[in-house]
Amino acid sequence: MTRTGVRLFLLVMFVITLVETAVFYTLAGEIIHVVSYATLCALAWWSVLRTGRRPHHRPRPRHRSAPTLQWVARVTVTEQGGRERLPWVLVAAGMTLWFAGDAYELISAHFLGGAPAVGISDAFWLGGYPLMAAAMALMARRRAPGRLWGAVVDALTLTVAAGAVSWQFIMKPLAEGGTLAESAVPLLYPFADVVLLSGALLVAMSPGVRTAPTRLVLAGAVWFLGMDLAWNVLPYFVSEDLYGRLGAAMVFGNALLVAAGMHPARLELTSPGPEITVLHPARIFFLAVALMTAPLLTLVADDKITAVVASAGCALLVIVRFTTAVREQERAQELLAQQARRDPLTGLANRSVLRDRLARAVPAPDDPIAVLYLDLDGFKEINDKYGHEAGDAVLRAIADRLSAAVREQDLVARLGGDEFVLLLPGVGADEAVRLAERLLTDVAWPVPFEGHHLVVGASIGIAARTALGDEALLRVADAAMYRAKQLGRGRYVLS
């Protein structure tokens, strides 16, 4: 469905909701409710069936037979479709359970002698809440794979605070008086709202794009929570004739979820999104409110134990969140430091690391040390003929070969372009020459790339001294490398 179609659908459903609310207690209202609700359930399952049908465009893999490509394509589309479809299956199932509860209540009222205060309808209605919450939790997990811990802690903090308020002002009054069934079942609805709230908070706080589909899902959750809250609060202020019409308004909340499932950008809810590096001010504000809510309850609540437990829970979650944020900051700083000292293409050390190691590798005049300065021969021709991707493949392959040829205490660095340096502490001239001869052979091995075999050579300059400064040692090896190139490439020169 197009974006315009989604807007038109919501407008029509809003008008239907208003009409149903006006005629809620009549036969016409019941017919409108059943037809509109059944239509929404059908659309929800239809959106499930169409989710994941259209595969994303992917580059065609090379060097595979046609049957293999077809099998890989089928498996890829099936796996993607299943991952995208599961949250919407849960949404459609939860919606269907809610409709089943409404339908059974109408059947009981018309054909079974009246609807009981607590009955099978409650099982259907209560069963829909965990399915909706699970669907939203899966959406959050799909949006931020491996990056959801911060959102989970923040959502739990807000949920604990909301649960404490709900217990004090909604659940506890419902639990007082009446039989076990009459008090326990109504008590489950606020608890189910807290579960639904936790799922909505996970979606709201998870990283990812937040355009119309995400807003529609969150709006649907807020709509349900608002209707349930009104259902518990309005009886104290208005007659049943007025607050009973909220049953008609619940249909529009389902329409919001169906609109999200039919939206052309619905994949944002089940696809990995960009990582959020800063906390939104609104998120900080709500977390602060949650942290203050539980302590304030101790001042106004009769149930001090619940307030104290909620305060302790919120405090513990805040400590966990703070610890997590500090560790994330430490990992980010460590990653930045590592990136500043590593070549991004090959993962080798860069010039800064090489200079530090050179300064530490020549502590005394009598300590032997060797430097091999290596420049690739024929690399520019590969770049010009096959492109930069081919050149990058060659550089990565050469980096792996150089790293495999040295000891653990040695250092391999890329200075930029096609220039590499090997720092060999404790290695004399003879051993450095033998390594250079082996590297000339290793570097010359072809590098496979997209059906081609790319071949480069190397010119190596060797500086092996016992009493030479770090920068001078590097300059001598560089000069020796240029002499090797002048002598015909594919060779080494010992200075």
Image (cartoon, rainbow, N blue to C red):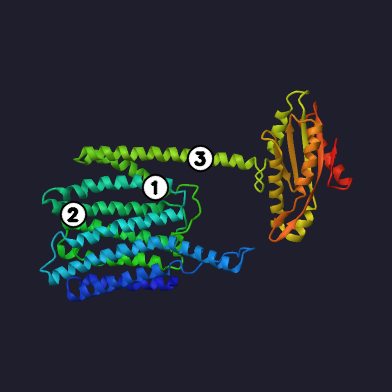
Tag 1, which secondary structure?
helix
Tell me where residue 9 appears, x and y as whole percent: 37, 72
Asked if residue 275 is positioned above or below residue 98 in the image, the reply reads above
Q: Which mark is residue 94?
A: none
Q: Earlier in the sequence, mark 2 or mark 1?
A: 1
Q: Please tell me which residue is depicted at 55% across the width and 39% down the height of the picture.
A: 333
Q: Are marks 3 and 2 in contact (CB under 8 Å)?
A: no
**Disc 3: CA contacts within 10 A as few (<14), some (14-19) or many (>=20):** few
Asked if residue 431 is positioned above or below residue 485 in the image, the reply reads above
Tell me where residue 121 appears, x and y as whole percent: 20, 62
Q: Are marks 2 and 1 in contact (CB under 8 Å)?
A: no
Residue labelled with disc 3: 329
* Numbered circles on residues, count: 3
Q: Are marks 1 and 3 in contact (CB under 8 Å)?
A: no
Answer with the quarter of the image where residue 186 lies.
bottom left
Q: Which mark is residue 185?
A: 2
Q: Earlier in the sequence, mark 1 or mark 3?
A: 1
**Disc 1: CA contacts within 10 A as few (<14), some (14-19) or many (>=20):** many
- The alpha-carbon separation of the residues under discs 1 and 3 comes to 18 Å
Residue labelled with disc 1: 152
- Please name whichever residue, 366 or 277, is drawn nearer the observer in this view of the structure: 366
Residue 442 lies left or right of residue 127; in this view the side is right
- The alpha-carbon separation of the residues under discs 3 and 2 comes to 46 Å
Kindly identify the amino acid type of the residue bearing the numbered disc 3: Gln
Residue 40 lies left or right of residue 206; in this view the side is left
Kindly identify the amino acid type of the residue bearing the numbered disc 2: Val
- The alpha-carbon separation of the residues under discs 2 and 1 comes to 28 Å
- Quadrant of the drawing holding the N terminus: bottom left
